[in-house]
Amino acid sequence: MLWNALQEQTVILGWDFYIPVILFVVLCALAVPVWAAIGVAAISMLLLSGDLPLSLVGESLFAGIDHFALTAIPLFILTGDVLVRTGLSRKFLDVAEALTCWAKGGFGSATVLVCGMFSAISGSDAAGAAAVGRMTIDRLVESGYPRPYACALVAAGACTGILIPPSIAYIVIGLVLGISASTLFQAALIPGLAILGSILATNIVMNRIYAFEGGGLITWGEWIRNLGSSVKSGWYAFIVPGIIFYGIFSGRLTPTEAGATAVIVTIMIGFILGTLKLSDFPSMLISSAKVNGVILPIIAFSLPLAQALAIMGVPQGFVYSVTSMTDNPYVLILMMIGILIAAGCVMETTPNIVILAPILKPLADEIGMNEIQFCVMMITALGVGFITPPLGLNLFVVSGLTGESILKIAVYAIPFVLFMLIVVLLIAFIPELSTTLLPDVYK
């Protein structure tokens, strides 16, 4: 009844809404840090609207990040950094290469697999693009791939950082919408692997068309020996993902506990192998703190902004405006996907989630979409935005890493976007993809 009452009235937005939005856009265009731009927009919106006393902003900032679940974020970031410094990420590449060397385009497929392995553990697509790009791009070029294509391949593979659980993005959206992160991790497993499969399929198709890379010239006996040798020399690297996945999906560990355990085990392995020393800790902790210092202020300042938008009735007004144009659920879902991909092109995942999730969630509820399915669709669509030309954030990461023209990389990224978009549409229209592994109460 409350929702029907809200629908019967149109929310009229005035300058108390438009001025903060314009300020936000201008500040972002001037390269002001996103957290600062969001903070200015939130404070100006509260001042102009008078809906909440400004004295509550400080309380809201600290209350917003005072959640046990958020502790998992710095832990997963630190795990990814330790993996690189101990050389364990290279072991992932060796095993992935041995696994795919029998196939045409084998090293390209290995690159995608190691992107999935590393990014899923670190929970960060940018970290995955940088770490895997340094290891693989030059070797991809030596294998016969054009450098722009190699960059696009790494950028696409790194998208799995927010798509394959455990993922920082699912922790944040769970916090914003009040959904268990462990539940979202389970729901995201099949869609995340489907995205990984779509990237592999794209690389295979491109290799069939352009014959970038050879392969498939070894016998099955040689393949088994190579794989066995790689696993034997690097099996210990898989202890870390094993702990994370088993702990979370068995329900024995929360995401925070799994992250803490992964950090400790990774450090222990580094000490045992002699690849990690006490002198490495200051730089390692500073590096992880810098990444974490970008994410948490965004969350902190985004929550007061989300509260201000909710009090002003922006989510209800958005739903009313959109459903006034059409009530076709298929059209509305396509509109949501378009908004999310466009947002993913120009802004990081965290602010997109905190700002857009409360606005789009009522629209998803209105058309009867399962809330778990909505979360998975949202994160996956944002992930596609990371490599959508010409503004995808991952394209800029690999361009900065290699000095390659972003426009050249963007051209080669188009097939990956198309294949990934097919998976997004399947997730949006087939609820079972994101609810199959969940108890009946979530279906």
Image (spheres, rainbow, N blue to C red):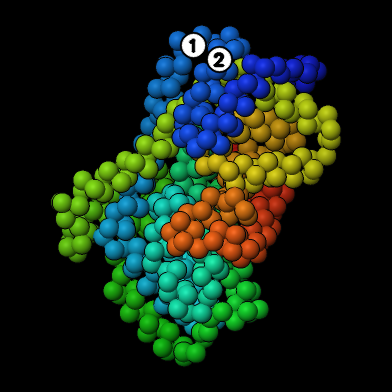
Relative to 214, residue 154 above or below: above
Looking at the image, can residue 167 be seen?
yes
Residue 386, percent across and down?
56, 51
What whole-number distance in Å separates the C-alpha atoms at marks 1 and 2?
A: 7 Å
Question: In the image, is 202 to the left or to the right of 93?
Answer: right
Relative to 255, residue 23 above or below: above
Which mark, residue 46? Answer: 2
Amino acid type shown at disc 1: Leu
The residue sitting at 41% across, 34% down in the picture is 296
The quarter of the rendered structure image containing the N terminus is top right
The residue sitting at 63% across, 37% down in the picture is 371
Question: In the image, is 228 to the left or to the right of 266?
Answer: right
Residue 201, percent across and down?
61, 69
Relative to 353, residue 50 above or below: above
Report helix, strand or loop for mark 1.
loop
Mark closer to the chain start, 1 or 2: 2
Residue 147, percent across and down?
51, 70
Question: In the image, is 431 to the left or to the right of 141?
Answer: right
The quarter of the rendered structure image containing the C terminus is top right
Residue under pointer 1: 54
The residue sitting at 58% across, 26% down in the picture is 23
Question: In the image, is 356 to the left or to the right of 182?
Answer: right
Relative to 153, residue 4 above or below: above
Residue 271, by quadrant, is bottom left
Residue 354, percent across and down?
54, 32
Q: Nearer the viewer, residue 184 or 205?
A: 205
Amino acid type shown at disc 2: Leu
Q: Residues within 10 Å of mark 2 (few under 14, many from 20)?
A: many
Report helix, strand or loop for mark 2.
helix
Residue 412, by quadrant, is bottom right
Task: Tell me whether circle 1 and circle 2 mark residues in contact (CB < 8 Å).
Answer: yes
